């Protein structure tokens, strides 16, 4: 009976999320909005908006510089936000969390401040074929600069990272492993802690793209042993323009700044300057104060729901969606089985172009995504030019999947598939 009551409480909590998100009350083309584009951006609940509004309406002032009351309140709120995000990610100390614009900037920070100083000719950077461009293009540039080599790990027949191949290619020549925690196309969940142990054994460091995982999985950067971990606020109920880089303090302290100017300095003379301590060293200029407060409110919101419950909700929706989608003739799902992925499904439907699929779905009120999803090499690897993608989150229900299936059947009829 207790277990049943707990399940009822969980369902009630997740139903309330829908009421918290104003966008989800919309109708599109005369139909109730079914929002299934969460891998690109999640919807923002009212408590997040209210936290940001409180900053802009009550103590809108710059941080770290002013002695007046508003600046002190803004500074307290900004640093409190850092602490909340650090706790959400399992970071050992708030100072190891740096606010950036997004996961892309976080990974570029590692590229310019760590890789540029530490990579040499003949070194290797190990990546997977399913990396988002944000965790691939920066390493291409650093490899070109240093004369290093990019080495790629493929996938198993089930759409998971090939750990046997990774172990084979992870030699002492590898100085950096840059890996996604959860693929934004396949939804595949990568065993990061195991990879970290293997990488550290050969002297390599690990940079983790957590843009998807931070929103869907329980994350503890200290427990996984990650050297760097990047994520974005807007993929986890927060605002755009704010992200985070977690880094091990000994690495951050040894790295050069990424963005020079105000706030990130200790002393400035006409001929030279010295840098502030971490994290201010990497937060040049006025930061996105309201965004940081919003991201922290989103982290609090998710923490109250419980990330184990968030992941379980993903699993419930995937278990319902897979058999429903597999009933559609000509539909091919890419990636691992439901129990080995997060709430993302990429697929093709016979010879209908994914953009045409997305257009029909939109007319039926279903928001999805089509293209290569900033993972063009992965699509080449899969032998397809593009895919359609739906991605679930905490406010989605089985009836959203029913609407998706109905819309896909309309697409088949329209294109005679």
Image (cartoon, rainbow, N blue to C red):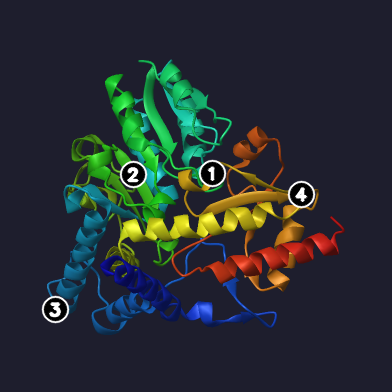
* Left or right of 249 in this view: 224: right
Q: Earlier in the sequence, mark 1 or mark 3?
A: 3
Residue visible at 23% across and 79% down in the picture: 59
Q: Earlier in the sequence, mark 2 or mark 1?
A: 2
Q: Find residue 229 and name its label.
A: 2
Q: Earlier in the sequence, mark 2 or mark 4?
A: 2
Please identify, in this view, whether the residue under mark 3 or under mark 4 is nearer the observer: 4
Q: CA distance from mark 2 to mark 4?
A: 38 Å
Q: Is residue 331 visible?
A: yes
Q: Earlier in the sequence, mark 3 or mark 4?
A: 3
Q: Earlier in the sequence, mark 2 or mark 3?
A: 3
Q: CA distance from mark 2 to mark 3?
A: 34 Å
Q: CA distance from mark 2 to mark 1?
A: 26 Å
Query: From what the image shows, is residue 170 above or below residue 3?
Result: above
Please identify, in this view, whether the residue under mark 2 or under mark 4 is nearer the observer: 4
Q: Is residue 247 visible?
A: no
């Amino acid at each position: 009976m207790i277990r049943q009551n707990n399940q009822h409480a969980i369902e009630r909590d997740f139903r309330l999320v829908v009421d918290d998100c104003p966008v989800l009350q919309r109708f599109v083309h005369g139909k109730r909005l079914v929002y299934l584009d969460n891998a690109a951006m999640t919807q923002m609940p009212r408590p997040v908006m209210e936290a940001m509004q409180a900053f802009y309406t009550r103590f809108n002032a710059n941080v770290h510089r002013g002695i007046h009351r508003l600046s002190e309140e803004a500074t307290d709120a900004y640093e409190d936000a850092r602490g909340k995000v650090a706790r959400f990610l399992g970071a050992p100390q708030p100072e190891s969390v740096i606010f950036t614009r997004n996961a892309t900037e976080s990974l570029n920070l590692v590229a310019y401040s760590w890789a540029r100083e530490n990579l040499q000719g003949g070194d290797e950077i190990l990546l997977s074929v399913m990396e988002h461009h944000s965790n691939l293009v920066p390493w291409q540039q650093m490899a070109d600069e240093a004369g290093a080599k990019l080495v790629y790990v493929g996938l198993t027949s089930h759409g998971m990272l090939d750990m046997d191949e990774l172990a084979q290619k992870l030699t002492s020549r590898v100085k950096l492993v840059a890996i996604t925690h959860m693929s934004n196309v396949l939804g595949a969940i990568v065993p990061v802690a195991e990879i970290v142990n293997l990488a550290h054994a050969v002297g390599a460091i690990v940079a983790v793209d957590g843009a998807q995982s931070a929103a869907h999985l329980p994350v503890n950067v200290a427990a996984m042993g990650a050297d760097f971990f990047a994520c974005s606020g807007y993929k986890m109920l927060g605002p755009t323009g704010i992200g985070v880089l977690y880094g091990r303090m000994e690495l951050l302290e040894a790295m050069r700044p990424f963005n020079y100017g105000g706030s990130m300095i200790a002393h400035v003379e006409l001929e030279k300057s010295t840098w502030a301590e971490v994290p201010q060293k990497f937060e040049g200029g006025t930061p996105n104060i309201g965004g940081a407060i919003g991201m922290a409110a989103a982290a609090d919101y998710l923490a109250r729901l419980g990330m184990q419950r968030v992941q379980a909700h993903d699993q419930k929706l995937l278990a319902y969606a897979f058999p429903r989608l597999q009933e559609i003739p000509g539909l091919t799902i890419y990636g691992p089985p439901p129990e080995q992925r997060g709430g993302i499904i990429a697929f093709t439907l016979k010879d209908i172009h994914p953009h045409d699929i997305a257009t029909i779905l939109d007319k039926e009120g279903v928001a999805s995504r089509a293209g290569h999803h900033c993972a063009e090499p992965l699509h080449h690897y899969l032998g397809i030019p593009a895919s359609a993608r739906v991605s679930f989150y905490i406010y989605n229900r089985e009836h959203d999947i029913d609407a998706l299936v109905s819309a896909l059947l309309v697409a088949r009829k329209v294109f005679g598939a």
